[in-house]
Amino acid sequence: MGGLSVRTKVFLLFAAAALLTVVPVLVLIRQAVAERVYASATQELESARGSTAVNWENSVSLLQEKARRIALEREVERLIREGEPGRLESALKRQIDEGQIAVAVDSAGRTLVGPVLDTSIVNTGRSAVFVPPQGTLPLRVAVRAVYMDTSTAPADTMSGAMAEDSVLIGMVGVAERLDTLLIAAVKSAAGGTDVALIAGDSVSVLASTLPDSLTAFLSGMSMRTVQAQGVRSSESGSLLYVAYRLNTTGRPAAIVLFRPVADELELVGGIDQSVIGIGVVALGLAVGLALVIARIVARPAQALAAAAADLARGNFGAPLPAASSDEIGQLTNAFRDMRSAIAEREGRLRSAQAELIHREKLAAMGRLVAQLSHEINNPIYNIQNCLEVLERRSDPRDPNREFLSLAQEELQRMAVLTRQMLDQSRPLADAAAPLDLNQLVQRVVALARPELDAHGIRASQNLRRGIPSVVAHPDALQQVLANLVANAIDAMPTGGELKVTTRADAEAVEVVVEDTGVGIAEEHLPHIFEAFYTTKPAVSGIGLGLFVSEGIIRGHRGRLFVESTVGKGSRFIVQLPRETLNASLATPDASETSEPAAV
């Protein structure tokens, strides 16, 4: 018991003491009553089996008598002799009851009327149960021989015995299908005991009055096991059964009678309720004592152990025991403080790791973009020069000159695209200098004024006085703000209001560009800073503006994020942390200039 908890040990000791006194008495009482139940049920089954045997033999005798009468019919003899199966079948059906089946074969064993029977029945003319190989239901069959009298004696003087001057011309008889209706009649003869007709060495239930549970109990059993001598019981002991073997041809078959005893066995519980009550009281005392000890010591200790295991798996939210002033409470408080400290350090570590991975990806992407842009840019300018030469040398009246202009415009778009990609990968610290954000905002808005007026957009500026200067790349930040203003203009095609705000707190300096345009759908928000992702029509956007802008701000160790509501507008926030706004950005060391600072 060294590995068990205190609660379990206390419970086991008290429970063992109580059960060792109650269980022996309980077992003796149950055994005596169960023996009486089984004896009574066995007697009932033996009686039902005897009734079933008598009823079955009587039914067979009736079939045999009916077959004998049919065999003596002169018309039947004539129709067999003349080979008239159709008329023979009609004649036979007039002699049998509804639901019964007429049977007739000729002297060669060929079936004339009814189902094809086993040769042992045809050859011997005896009564038996014919069990087909599979498919159809078994038949209880009785047949008699039909003789043709070759003498001149009148037909009404012939007897059933074979005369010396008689010739066998066939067999006739009657059969009954052993279906559910016939099995129900057997059940009635057995006094209401449930019965089942089974066949095959590996038992299959052909017809029964059983519920599905008992049918499943029989299926797949061995016929030899079912037909064993005497009354047998199921493995659980809640069911007794006995088999009455049938005289069959083909597969073996039997009728099984069942006697459930589960209800009688349940009555045993009423006999020893007083003894069980004593045991329940003893167990209740053991459980109560174990719960008291668990509430005081074991449960808080287990909760702390589970919380420690969850903490090892990275779960910092496992429940802890309720606060208390005892030693367990002090241990709980110390554990809670330790877990909070670990969770805080874990969060900072994961955030730093994610940021590092992201920067590494962006740096690799920046190097690739810079190389591709450089390689593409040179051919573009060469082609532009060639087009300019062609334009100067061509006839001004040549109608094909417009295609030169179109080609130059498209090359200009490609040049702008490659320049934006180069700007994305250019080290920003190369030309960093102290910068007044308020003046930069005023310059960007002034440059955009004609386009704002053309679109009917009202522009306002809320610039905080005394905002700290930013050590940054002036052209790069101007490009970011100009791009945000241009996006705001595109978002308000029918006019609206543009508001640019500067602000600062103890940690960061911010520029907010806010519009009252169409807004950005929620499904687009996670992707707007991705390269070549745009919500504008293909003719007006290539999806690099926000990608480049975000890379520039990240190169200044800042953040660019958006808040937007569809139909109400968007708010883009450029955030630059104050702790990095110093001369270190303007004079980078060798490690910072060895690769692009923003991607």
Image (cartoon, rainbow, N blue to C red):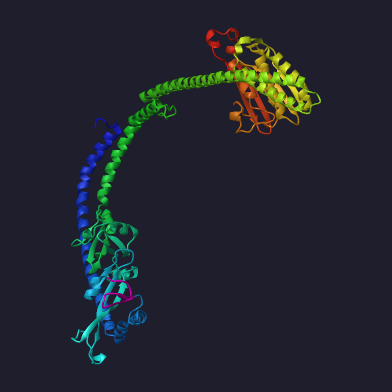
Residue positioned 76% across, 20% down in the render: 393
The x and y percentages for residue 488 are 70, 26
Q: Is residue 491 visible?
A: yes
Image side of residue 114 versus residue 527, left or right:
left
Assign the C terminus to one quadrant of the image.
top right
Residue 588 at what x, y percent from top left? Answer: 57, 8
157 horizontally vs 526: left or right: left
| Horizontal and vertical percent position of residue 267 | 27, 57
- Judging depth in this view, the residue of 256 and 71 nearest the camera is 71
Say whether residue 184 is left or right of residue 37.
right
Q: Which residues are magenta?
A: 100-117
What is the residue that sits farthest to the right in this orientation? Answer: 397
Nearest to the observer: residue 387 or residue 416: 387
In the image, is residue 29 above or below residue 558?
below
Could you tell me which residue is drawn at 28 percent across and 58 percent down?
A: 218
Q: Is residue 592 magenta?
A: no
Front-lying residue, 596 or 572 = 596
- Residue drawn at (28%, 80%), measured in percent from left and top? 66
Relative vertical location of residue 312 with respect to residue 132 in this rendering, above or below? above
How many dots with numbers? 0
Residue 599, visible in the rendered structure:
no
Q: Quadrant of the N terminus?
A: top left
